[in-house]
Image (cartoon, grey):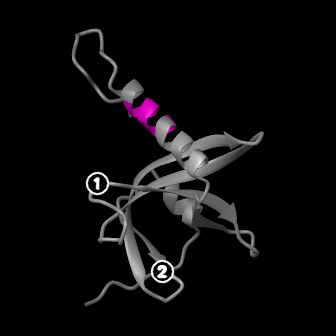
Amino acid sequence: MKDKLVKVDVLDVLLDKDNTSPIVLKEKNGKSISFKQIAVIPHEVKGECLLFAVLEPMTKIEGIGDNEALVFRVVQNKEGGSRIVVEEDEMVAIAVFNKYYDMLEDSMKETPAGKKKPKK
């Protein structure tokens, strides 16, 4: 039996710590693409605090290499819900990735016992 897609507010999915299901987005042509959520990162752009999602495609996308991810900006739709759009400003996307790498580095700092332990 094929899984049925349920339309939900993407912000509810992104902020659900227990969600391990893929995030499925539809292209304009109707094709569905599944993504693995890597991180949700707040970042200030021109004085405004915005929310971004780093997502890794689970299927091959032309121009995106293996183990590469995309930065999406969370925006409000006309109905008051949330949707995500690919961040087109390269400098913003780089800044979000840098913030993500900083978060990874912080989570791997040495513990008192000398072992590396990721933060939860």
Q: Nearer the viewer, mark 2 or mark 1?
A: 1
Residue 100 as seen in the image, left or right of residue 80: left
To which quarter of the image does residue 33 belong? bottom left
- Residue stretch in magenta: 99-104
Q: Disc 1 on helix, strand or loop?
A: loop
In the rendering, at what x and y percent does residue 25 appear? 47, 74
**Which residue bears the numbered disc 2?**
6
In the rendering, at what x and y percent does residue 40 appear? 51, 48
Give the answer, above or below, for where 32 lies relative to 87. Answer: below
To which quarter of the image does residue 47 belong? top right
Give the answer, above or below, for where 108 lies relative to 111. Answer: below
**Which residue bears the numbered disc 1?**
67
Residue closest to the eye, 65 or 6: 65
Give the answer, above or below, for where 2 lies relative to 114. Answer: below
Q: Does residue 109 belong to the magenta stretch?
A: no
In the rendering, at what x and y percent does residue 55 appear? 43, 57
| Image quadrant containing the N terminus | bottom left
Q: Earlier in the sequence, mark 2 or mark 1?
A: 2
Q: Residues within 10 Å of mark 1 (few under 14, many from 20)?
A: few
Majority secondary structure of the magenta segment? helix
Amino acid type, label 2? Val
> Could you tell me which residue is drawn at 49 percent across and 89 percent down?
29
In the rendering, at what x and y percent does residue 76 appear? 71, 65
Residue 70 as seen in the image, left or right of residue 115: right
Amino acid type, label 1? Asn
Q: How many tags in the picture?
A: 2
Q: Residues within 10 Å of mark 2 (few under 14, many from 20)?
A: few
> Could you tell me which residue is drawn at 51 percent across and 36 percent down?
99
> Could you tell me which residue is drawn at 39 percent across and 55 percent down?
69
Residue 50 as seen in the image, left or right of residue 53: right
